[in-house]
Amino acid sequence: MSHQEGNCSSETKTIKTVNLTIDGIPVSVPEGTKILDAAKKANVDIPILCDHPDLCKRALCRICVVEADGRGKLIAACANDVWEGVKIVTRNKRIAKIRRTIIELILAKHPQDCLSCVRNRNCELQKLALGYGVFKTPFKNEPVFWPVTTECDTLDHDMSKCIKCCRCVDVCQEKQTIRAVNTSYRSHKFRIATPYKQAMEETPCVFCGQCARVCPVGAIYEHDQTEEVQAAFTAGKKTIAQVLPSLASALDKEFSLPEGTVTTGKMIAAIKLLGFDKVYDAANTVNAVNIDISREVQTKKEKQNKPTISGCSEGVSRFINNFYPELADCMTAVKNPRKIFASIIKGSYAKETRTESSNVISVSFVPCAAQKYTTQKDASDFALTSKELAKMIKLAGVEIENLAEAQFDAININCNTDNSLPKKLTVYGFAEARKTMEAIIKGECDADWVEILSCPKDCVCSGGCQAD
């Protein structure tokens, strides 16, 4: 067990160092280090499938098995600590054969439709199969097919492709503390399911999209609405977009380009080439929302001694209503940037251009899948993630890195600035949000305004981007 530095003592406790070899390479790591992490330090690659750096160690897939001290028993590198003097072997004929057999067994229960799968060329199982030369399985292919379900135009579930790694369960239960999904049944009937087979909207799910972010295959993914937007182009409707400048960095990742290649100007140029009539800076509506909430905070302070609560998505309201209904009155009444933008476009823009509001489509390009979720579905209001934007750019044959810079179109949003800034606390992820809500209930939160962001990480790198 590793030693940690105490908070109340001035003494520094020594962390014991463990010496070992991995494939003959000497390595020294702190006691308590997993074999998998020690191998990374030695630049030795051990394949994984169920393991994820942000989640607990279940050791379900057994792809990462290694030999230790020449023993016959193989151990999972992701779940076992190193020990002094151990000699780890990560690759030999025996281990390679076992790993290939595991992959073949998984593929025997997996649909063979890689070319049409949303995760094609970005699938961890596919990469493993290619890496170990598994192009077909010697076992009879008998996948159990389940219908693909779409949840609130936010997430799609194709449980036929689920490999039962339980990453989605762990991120939902441990990282986000929502517990909308869990494991059900045993043996060959083992599967991931909601309580009592409920639809996701009937569960406590907040549609944060973290399950899609960690899924290694195409079992859970964001709902794609690019075809609906393309249909608006075809129908000749005025299609107006807003996008945050920071989304350009997410496109670098989507196109596997060096950081900083896709600038804000290149992103704007690409969006306009797709057929959008206008492209506005979403920072304008974000600022308008923040100013309106600041005013609301000042007004509420006179009537209640609790902070105003806002969120990056409508899923935050679900979180409060499901888990902390006593704080429902603290939720802001201000619309989110997507809704404000849609109302402006269908109001003043439609009037200025003498266009019927029914012929105006608003599209907000958002950082993550959480912001796709809405309780009020509008066929003329869409939220597309960076992944969907990248898909549209690729299908249009646009080489975004070679585009000339373009500018945002001008938009006038009336914002009466308020010099009095409330004390604001930003919370990342619902596990941390729980702690803050408990503090509010106990009267231990001195913030005037609490903003909850659905993602435990920076939004630009979460649910809407390529899976980790």
Image (tube, grey):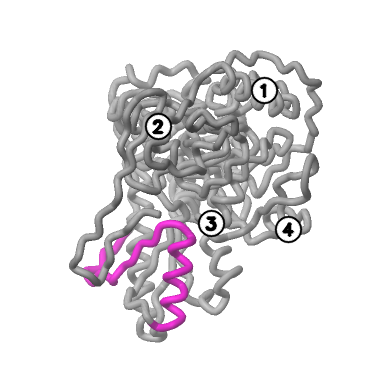
Amino acid carrying mark 1 in the image? Thr
275 within the magenta span:
no
At label 2, which amino acid type do we have? Ala
**Counting residues from the N terminus, which is met first, the one under dot 3 or under dot 4?**
3
- Which of the 4 image quarters holds residue 189? top right
Q: Which residue is mark 4?
A: 195
Residues at marks 3 and 4, CA–CA distance in whole angstroms: 17 Å
Give the crowd class for mark 3: few <14, some 14-19, many >=20 residues within 10 Å: some
Q: Residues within 10 Å of mark 4 (few under 14, many from 20)?
A: some
Query: Is residue 24 toward the left or the right of residue 380 in the image?
Result: left
> Is 310 in front, or is 465?
465
Q: Using the image as rendered, state which of residue 253 and residue 237 is in the foreground.
A: 253
Q: Nearer the viewer, mark 3 or mark 4?
A: 3
Please tell me whether mark 4 sits on a helix, a strand or a loop: helix
Q: Which mark is residue 39?
A: 2
For label 3, the residue is 174
Quadrant that contains the N terminus: bottom left
For badge 4, the amino acid type reads Pro
387 on left or right of 225? left
Up-down: is 397 above or below 379? above
